[in-house]
Image: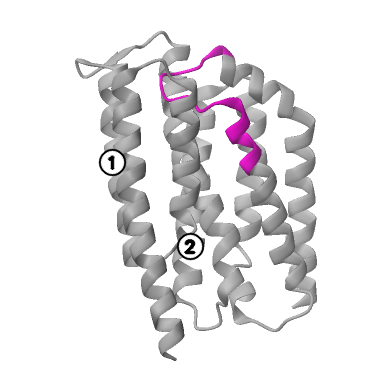
Amino acid sequence: MKKLSFLFLLFFILMVAVNYGTSGQVSTVANAGASVIQPAGYTFSIWGAIYLLVFAWIIRGFFIQSSLYEQLKILVPLNFILNALWVITFSREYVILSVIIIFGLLVTLILIFRIIHASPDAKGFDYVPFSLYFGWVTVASIVNIFTAFLQYDQTEFLGLSEMTWAVIVIIVATLLTIFITWSFKDVVYGLAVIWAFIGIIVQTDSSLLTIVLTVAIALIAIVWLIVVWQKLRNHHSL
């Protein structure tokens, strides 16, 4: 167990080092190709929370016995590698390649999320780091696609404008968030999505996008509150 946690820690340090070394370049590229759904700069501070929580989860593995860490022995290092590769490719403006990599990153998070929720050994804290991570990367992958289109001066796709696609993907992301929150009774994933949506509202000049995002946040918040209430009721009934 300790060897596995040490392996996780090694790949984690590598990922954080790459992120730290290229953070300025990433923000420069992102701001240069800002799409209509580009979140405000401050929202990217969520990465700090994600990394701190993941770090705490790794350190926790040194002190407990859980089959969950064994189940994730390939996916977690792979996720960290893809994260570092995404930062490198995006900062060097290989935006198309970065889209492919971030979707690979998203796939690893989907698999990690499913394993954690299916594992009988998963405890309360096991859900937090990767649900927050998963929620944020869901939105980040969408933004990455828009950035890629703008890099090649493509403001339309299949006859639809960038704004129309923005509304469509926000609706899809909202429905997905509601589904995940409700189906898995996960109260963390939706918080990351809401955080990203608020960041887009702060950044955008579009009244249409502001209205759509406000409605989306309200719907997610309603489902989130219902799930929280159910969890509290079940806890008190024990």
Q: Is residue 177 visible?
A: no
The residue sitting at 48% across, 50% down in the picture is 191
Q: Quick one: label 2 or label 1, which is nearer the N terminus?
A: 2
Question: To which residue does mark 2 refer?
Answer: 113
Against 129, residue 63 (above or below) is below
The residue most toward the left is 159
Q: Where does the image place residue 168, in percent across and percent down from the top left? A: 26, 31
Residue 65 within the magenta-colored segment of the rendering: no
Q: Is residue 210 visible?
A: yes
SS for tag 2? helix
Q: Tell me the number on the disc at residue 70.
A: none
The residue sitting at 50% across, 17% down in the picture is 34
Residue at mark 2 to residue at mark 1: CA–CA distance:
19 Å
Residue type at numbered disc 1: Val
Q: Are marks 2 and 1 in contact (CB under 8 Å)?
A: no
Q: How many marks?
A: 2
Against 235, residue 97 (above or below) is above
Closer to the camera, 75 or 57? 57
Q: Nearer the viewer, mark 2 or mark 1?
A: 1
**10 Å neighbourhood of mark 1: few (<14), some, or many (≥20)?**
few
Q: Is residue 227 shown left or right of residue 54?
A: left
Quarter residue 237 falls in: bottom left
**10 Å neighbourhood of mark 2: few (<14), some, or many (≥20)?**
many
User: What colour-coding does the image apply?
Assistant: one colour
Q: Where does the image place residue 153, in percent across and percent down from the top left? A: 41, 8
The residue sitting at 44% across, 66% down in the picture is 114
- Of the 4 image quadrants, the one containing the C terminus is bottom left
Q: Tell me the number on the disc at residue 172.
A: 1
SS for tag 1? helix
Q: Which residues are magenta?
A: 32-46
Q: Where does the image place residue 134, in percent across and percent down from the top left? A: 50, 51
Residue 33 within the magenta-colored segment of the rendering: yes
